[in-house]
Structures are given as structure tokens and as C-alpha cells.
Amino acid sequence: MHAPEQDTILSVKNLSVHFGRYAKPAVDGVSFDLKAERLGIVGESGSGKSTLGRAVMRLLPPIGRVTADTLTFDGMNVLAAKEKQMRSLRGNSMALIMQDPRYSLNPVLPIGKQVAEAAILHLNVGKTEAYKMAATMLERVRIADIERTMKLYPHQISGGMGQRVMIAMMLLAKPRMVIADEPTSALDVSVRGDVLKLLDELVRENNAGLMLISHDIRMVAAFCERIMVMYKGRVVETLTSLEEAKHPYTRGLIAAMPDLKAPVRRLKTLDRNAIDAVEVRP
Amino acid sequence: MIDVQDLSVSFGSGASAKQVVKGVSFSVTKGETLGIVGESGCGKSTVLRSLAGLDRHWTGKVSLSGTEVDKVRTREQMLLTQMVFQDPYGSIHPRHRISRILAEPIRAMDRGKGWDMVAPALEQVGLPTAFADRFPHQLSGGQRQRVAIARALMLEPEIILLDEPTSALDVSVQAEVLNLLADLKEARNLTYVLVSHDLSVIAHMCDRVLVMKAGVFVDELTKDDLYQGRTHHDYSRMLFEASAL
């Protein structure tokens, strides 16, 4: 068997996103390769991290123009692909997990039906088989009392449970790449760790690539092998651990977080002038 | 400053009644910051709403600044506390200009028109006075939360109740807001009660922390306990480990 870790799943070179007639790009010349690994993307709101995630899946509204030298997923040119081809990819081999399960689950369908629907759509199976697969998958994400839960509607379950249902739904088709966009920021601290561990376990099992998008740099660092730090649409730094951080923006982000183990009297805030001074580019 | 004896809150009536807060007692001295931490649904926000006078179906005894308050507050009792909510998008009127939002408490309490107090209030939370003519949607989340804090300070209360004041904000903006709260507390000798599920925020801000679970306080931690990682209850240890990811 060949070593699948070496395969590049997603290759991005010089990707930019422009919105409408704005001359300033929301994502500005980003390049990276994703293998079967966990890549974290960190930045403030408005840094372009979510736009990048959506651009890769071609999920931006028509007003967002994506340009790139290369954007290939599993050897296929994503930019040239027809919408029909993209639809067969999304959910099947690339999956997106969004922030808040309250908005991303369909409120008028029972949980079981939604998860089974994913199986019917992507795996070409019959209804009975799909429900069976949904039940197995829900068991995998450690949902207790599956019989009962499958009949519940999204508003009847908690946020942590909703996010686990979302993970079950997205990973049912064993995608090659999972983009998790702030998967835990709507959740309580006490369930955050569980959801992350679960996501990691399932992604590893499928030997897939995970892009974890978050503003919580410490969480990302604890979880990912590589961290890409974005500021104003650009990647300012790629790190493997927080200690290597050199860019003032990355250091600012780390210092801005209160740390349980290292108390400070005053939190440091970002010195935006210093960051912009480093970031001057023609 | 705050003294709460045997506070209970139930929702619903008869057989379907659910007791959310189960006879809690605590007190906060002047100038102290008390943190209440716990997972969603444990009743921490309900305690705060009862203190603020927003919920009126509690039982027990609540004293603020040495006076026992009624369930339906008198005007004097309302002046004692102010609250800052989690979501700055929801807690500010979307179609009022910032000046009107800030003047509202003054006018509601019949203390004049309040327009002349808008500029100093904005300056005090570090916003330019030109923001007075803007609408909330023209401000960022952090700026909006600053407006909410400025509004809470308009009537010069001694107690500020903070319900997850930074959980809707980015880390970098969170640091700015937490610093602002610390500065204001020092300048005005305020007393804070801060509710959050983020233990690192609580540990940064608070002198003392109460850990709440299913309507009761299961643990009390001092600042020192938090830094040493000392806990006295299984549940607070679990919370602690989840936060120190």
C-alpha cells in the first residue's frame, strides 16, 4: 500500500477573492498545500479566513470573484469545474462544518431523516440502508439513545449534540477534505474538547485533510500540525508551534488571550500600527 | 455590597414547574469582582437577571448596597444596578442613534434630556465623540459592546452585572473590552458580578469564582486556587481541564 500521507489533497497557489467592484481583495494571494493532516487557519473577524474556506469549495456568492494560479482538489481543477461537478464533490469528497448547528441543520426535518438524507444523496443507497448507516454514524459520534434522538427535531437537542449530528452528517460519506469553520465557538467550554476530539478521530480514520478555521489561536495550536495566520486577507506566517511566532500580529493574538496558567495584570492589545508597518507591500 | 440569601427561581407552575436556581446564598463586598462559571443551562444568567430586577418571580432575600430590594423595584432600587448583555447586536436598539441610546437611561429616570452627557460617556469608553450620530450597524461588535458599557455607566451605578460580556467578540477585541472594564472598575470603584463559561476570562477578571452546576454552587475558588489549579469538586476540575486545552 502506498503512503497516502504524502498525497496532496488540495493545492492552492496565489488564490485571491474580490468582492464586487472593491479593488481591495478579501483574500490576497494565498498559497498552501493540504495533505492528510490538520491545518489550522487563524485570524480575526474580517481577515478572510472563512472566505478562503468557502472559495476553496466554490461556495461564495456570484459577487465574489475567485482567481488563482492553481486550485486543484484531488487532481481536479476546481476553478474550471462545472457547477454540476462541484455539486457531486461537495458533501461527498469535500465537507464543510459550520459554526452554529442551530442554523446549519434543517429545523423542520427530524435528525435521523437529515443524516439519512446525506447517505441517500451521496452514497447511492436505499432508504432502509441509509437509516441504518445514519444510526451507525450517530453511534460513532457518541449520541446516546439513538432510536429516540433520530426522531427529534434540531430545536429539541443541545448545541453540543447538534454539532455532533452535523459532524456525523458531514463525515458519513467519508470525505477526503473537511473544512471546519469555527466548529466550536457556539459551544460551551465543557463540550468543546469532546467535539474536537471526535472530529479529529473521524478525520484521521478516513485519512482525510482537515482545515480548522478559528480565531482561538491556542485551541488551534493544541490541535493542528500547521497553523496559517491570516491578516487582512494575507497569510502572514505559517507555524508548527506557537513558540516560533515571529510576526507581531501572531504574537499580539497570543498575548491578547487571558491564560489560566500565566496570569497578567493587563492584557496586551494589538498594536495595529506596528503590524501594518511590517506588512507594507507594494 | 451585594448580599443574597436563599435565592430560588422556578419557571412554570404546578406539576411542570422547574426549579432553575435552588436556594443559593452569596455576598460580594464593595470593589470586588465575583465570577460565576458553569455550563449553559446551569442557572447562572438567571441569578444575574434576578439581581438586576429583570426577573420578578424569585424567592429569598436580596440586598444591594445595604438595602433590601423588592421584586418589583422602586426607582431608587433600579439605580443601584446596571447590566451588560452578551450580544451587543441584540441589546442595542438598531434604529436609534448612539446619542439617543446613551441618553435614554437619563431620560427614563427623569434626570433631564441627557444629550450633554453623551460625549463624555463615549470618551470614557475610548470611542470618538463623532460616533454619537451613528447607528449601531455602523459600528463593529467591539465598539457596540463599548456603547453598551457606556450606557450601563450613564446612571453611575455602583454595581455592574456582566452577562458573558465578551463571548460574542474576537480574542483581540475581547482583550480591549476586558482592559476597559478593569480600568473603569479602578477609576470608579465599581463592583462587578461577571458570568461566563470561559474560565480563562473569569480567572483574569475575578477575585473570587463560584462554580455553578444545576442550580447550586458546587465550589468556590479564589484567584490563587485558579492559578495553582486547585479545585475542590469533580465538576470544577472537569471545567478547569476543559478550559486549559
Image: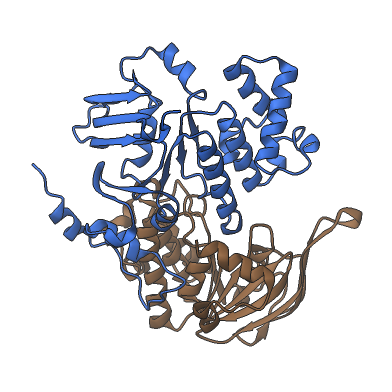
Chain colours: A blue, B brown
The answer to whether residue B183 is left or right of residue B3 is left
Residue B111 in view: yes
Using the image as rendered, state which of residue B11 and residue A239 is in the foreground.
Answer: A239
**Residue A188 drawn above or below residue A265:** above
Left-right relation of A92 to A240: right
Relative to A251, say whether B76 is above or below: below
Is B73 placed left or right of A145 in the picture? left
Q: Residue at x 23, y 35 (%)?
A: A25
**Location of residue A264 in the rendering, given as x and y in whole percent from the top left corner:** 38, 76
Residue found farthest to the front? A1
From the viewer's perspective, is residue B44 above or below residue A191? Answer: below
Query: Relative to B207, is A232 on the left or the right?
Result: left
B164 is higher (above) or lower (below) than A195: below
Is residue A110 in sight in this rendering? no
Where does the image place residue B22, in percent across and percent down from the top left? 78, 70
Q: How many numbered marks appear?
A: 0
The quarter of the rendered structure image containing the C terminus of chain A is top left
Quadrant housing residue B151:
bottom left
Q: Residue at x 47, y 39 (%)?
A: A180
Q: Nearer the viewer, residue B179 or A185?
A: A185
Residue that sits furthest to the right in the current view:
B15
Q: Position of residue B115 (x, y in %)?
A: 37, 64
- The image quadrant of residue B80 is bottom right
Please give the name of the residue rendered at 44% of the width and 57% of the height, measured from the top-left corner. B101
Q: Nearer the viewer, residue B180 or A123?
A: A123
Residue A19 picture location, percent across and down:
28, 30
